Structures are given as C-alpha cells and as structure tokens.
C-alpha cells in the first residue's frame, strides 16, 4: 500500500488538472476578453501574444481598447469597462497585479517636431521630422539602426492587472504573457513610471 500511495496521489492530481483544463476550455468558448492598454503596448508587444491566443483559443474573442495615456487604461479597468489592463503597474492598485517584465526606451533622433503619443512620435521620427523617446518595441525596422540606447538604460516595468480576480479567460491570457521572455532591467537602469 505504501508504494502505491504516491502513484495514487499523482493520478488524482492529474485527474483534477484534467477537469480544470476541461472547464477552462469550456469557459473560453463564446466569451470575450476585453483588454485596456496604451498604444505602444498594443502595437509593439501584444500582436504576437494575440496571435498565439487565437491559435490556442479560436472560439474566444479579444477586444483591445487602446488609450493615449496609461491612466485612461487604468481608469477603464477600475470602472469595469475592460477586464484587464496591460501597462506600467498602476500606483496604489487594489486588485490583482502581476509584473511581466521590462520595456526599454530608446531615443530616435531627428529634431524638428514633438509629439505626445508614442505611435505619432515614432512615425515623426520615421518621417525625419522629430526626435523622440519611445519603447524599443515600436521603433520601425527601418529606424532601428538610428535608435540610440540611453546610458544608463531607461525603461519601464510592465504589468497585467484587473479590478477583481482574473477570470478563466484573463488567467489564460496572463499565463500566455508569462510565456514571453521578458527582459530584466540592467542593475543601473533608470526605471520610470
């Protein structure tokens, strides 16, 4: 009996995990996960994650709400207008929050114009009419050679957060984001909020 007990426990644990996976798969059908984020995350980080999501959960839909400022995305989650937010960790957040990783900011030079939004700033730099500090993930490929890393490195932490407990769909998306190989900030990095 003693030799059998560990195997029996493993079998019961595997059966429980199979039941959880089946329930989660059923809950993924027909629902919609609404994500609030800022433009640079929507265009620079999430496309690959969303593509993987669609492969894994073809019946589950996503709605991406893109905001010009992180506080607007935070407000949308706090008000229940979006289920999760992805961006810098909101200060004094009361709901669940998980840190994802580091996003480095780089300088793309071309002095002539300034822009408030990261997408506009990157496009102005591309058109050679503006210098900007933008997340490295949104720098167009044709400008990457001109992008300058700051010394010390400058960047921000990214997180995923919710107003209340992550739903099964949100938890599945968070698990998918955990699979991404996020960079860690260098020891001397300047982390901005």
Image (tube, rainbow, N blue to C red):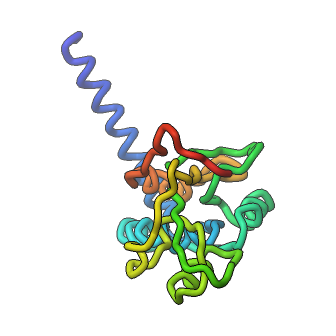
Residue 85 is at least partly visible in this image? yes
Left or right: residue 18 versus residue 186 is left
Left or right: residue 73 versus residue 5 is right
Can you name the residue that lies furthest to the front here?
Answer: 111
Compared to 72, does 4 lie above or below? Answer: above
- Indicate the position of residue 82 as horizontal and vertical percent values: 69, 65
Task: Tell me the residue at 60%/81% (across/down).
Answer: 130
Badge count: 0
Please state which of residues 118 and 65 is positioned toward the viewer in this rendering: 118
- Indicate the position of residue 49 as horizontal and vertical percent values: 43, 65
Compared to 184, does 121 lie above or below? Answer: below
- Indicate the position of residue 189 as horizontal and vertical percent values: 53, 44
Task: Tell me the residue at 43%/56% (across/down).
Answer: 176
Can you name the residue that lies furthest to the top here?
Answer: 2
Task: Tell me the residue at 50%/51% (across/down).
Answer: 151
- Indicate the position of residue 167 as horizontal and vertical percent values: 59, 54
Residue 64 is at least partly visible in this image? no
Can you name the residue that lies furthest to the bottom here?
Answer: 127
Compared to 157, does 3 lie above or below? Answer: above
Please state which of residues 123 and 182 is positioned toward the viewer in this rendering: 123
Task: Tell me the residue at 47%/59% (across/down).
Answer: 149
Q: In which quarter of the image is residue 14?
A: top left
Please state which of residues 46 and 109 is positioned toward the viewer in this rendering: 109
Locate the N terminus and report the quarter of the image it occupies: top left
Compared to 90, does 70 lie above or below? Answer: below
């Amino acid at each position: 009996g003693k030799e059998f007990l560990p195997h029996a426990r493993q079998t019961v644990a595997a059966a429980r995990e199979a039941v959880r996976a089946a329930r989660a798969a059923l809950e993924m059908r027909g629902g919609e996960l609404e994500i609030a984020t800022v433009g640079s995350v929507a265009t620079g980080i999430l496309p690959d994650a969303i593509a993987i999501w669609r492969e894994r959960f073809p019946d589950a839909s996503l709605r991406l709400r893109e905001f010009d400022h992180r506080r607007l995305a935070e407000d949308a989650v706090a008000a229940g207008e979006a289920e999760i937010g992805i961006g810098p960790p909101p200060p004094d957040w009361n709901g669940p929050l998980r840190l994802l990783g580091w996003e480095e900011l780089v300088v793309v030079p071309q002095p002539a114009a300034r822009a408030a939004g990261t997408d506009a700033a990157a496009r102005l730099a591309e058109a050679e009419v503006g210098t900007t500090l933008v997340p490295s993930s949104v720098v167009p490929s044709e400008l990457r050679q001109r992008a300058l890393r700051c010394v010390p490195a400058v960047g921000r932490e990214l997180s995923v957060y919710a107003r209340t407990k992550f739903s099964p769909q949100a938890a599945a998306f968070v698990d998918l984001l955990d699979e991404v190989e996020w960079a860690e900030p260098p020891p001397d990095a300047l982390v901005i909020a």
